[in-house]
Amino acid sequence: MSAVVAVFVCAIAIIFAPFSPIATLRRGSVRVLRPVMRFADSASRTIGSGGRVSVFSSCASCDDERIARKVAEAKLLQATQENESLKKMLGLKKQFAPSLTSAAVMLYNQSWDREWLVIDAGEDAGVHIGDIVIDEDQLLVGEITEVAAMSATVAVASDKGAAFSVALAPTGGEALAHGLGARAFSVELIPRDTPVHPGDMVVRASKSSRTIPPIFAGRIVSVDDRAGGAFKIGKAVLLAHPERINRVMVVNSL
């Protein structure tokens, strides 16, 4: 109420400023209201300052809670992925038992048309040169090329110069895969009468007569039968992603 009266008095003083009595009243009003104005300004600064501190404090608290929530979500996702990976590995062990050795990937590297992994299983785990290496999705990664006491080197299956027997799915025709580098294969010696189309799977063939689950190596992307003769040639790409793999399974002595 006093604030309304003060505003009313100031308005009258401004309107009737030319009149001497009003001028005197105006000077008196200013002297009377000056402490009130100083108090109001001080209160405004205090409230404003307190508001800013409260807002910043609240925002900082929100950021902390948001970060903590993100960290918890990331941990949960990682744990879930690790559990799923473990389930897949256990499933593979049952399918390939007793010829499967689990190993962690210690290093991935590449140079020109070659890629390789270093794993933490070697002679001590029964790993040998020539053993096939697969990932948790039963996809072909490569072959053991070097073995130490507690580690081994895996050459990726699509490396230039790599060669192995394959079968084509779903037709079942047999062929020979040659690595071209850059995750690509040349699939050769495909019988001309064997139907093969882009999208067909290339399966790593076993050297033994034992029945084992299929190991998927690649996917056909093109077929060339223009050369004539008894065979045609296909191009395929590697299905596995070696740079993303954390664990592998070594299929011993196929």
Image (spheres, rainbow, N blue to C red):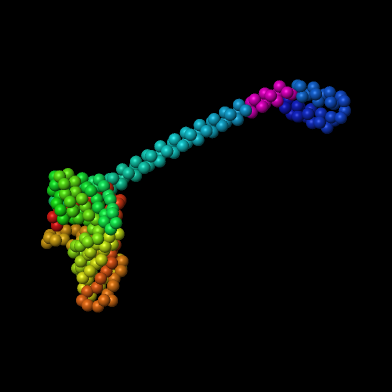
Q: Residue at x 19, y 46 (%)?
A: 151
Seen from the viewer's position, the closer of residues 128 and 45 is: 128
Could you tell me which quadrant the N terminus lies in?
top right
Q: Is residue 152 left or right of residue 26?
A: left
Q: Residue at x 34, y 41 (%)?
A: 75
- Could you say which quadrant of the image residue 18 lies in? top right
Q: Is residue 110 left or right of residue 68?
A: left
Could you tell me which quadrant the C terminus lies in?
bottom left
Point out the stretch of residues depicted in magenta: 33-44
Q: Which residue is at the far left? A: 209
Magenta run includes residue 158: no
Q: Which residue is at the far front? A: 112
Q: Residue 50 appears at what percent x and percent y? A: 57, 28
Seen from the viewer's position, the closer of residues 121 and 179 is: 179
Q: Residue at x 23, y 64 (%)?
A: 178
- Could you say which quadrant of the image residue 185 lies in? bottom left
Q: Is residue 50 above or below residue 250?
A: above
Seen from the viewer's position, the closer of residues 158 and 100 is: 158
Residue 239 shows up from this direction: no
Q: Residue 99 appears at what percent x and percent y? A: 14, 52
Magenta run includes residue 42: yes
Q: Residue 233 appears at what percent x and percent y? A: 25, 71
Q: Residue at x 79, y 31 (%)?
A: 11
Q: Residue 192 appears at what percent x and percent y? A: 23, 75
Q: Is residue 240 above or below residue 55?
A: below
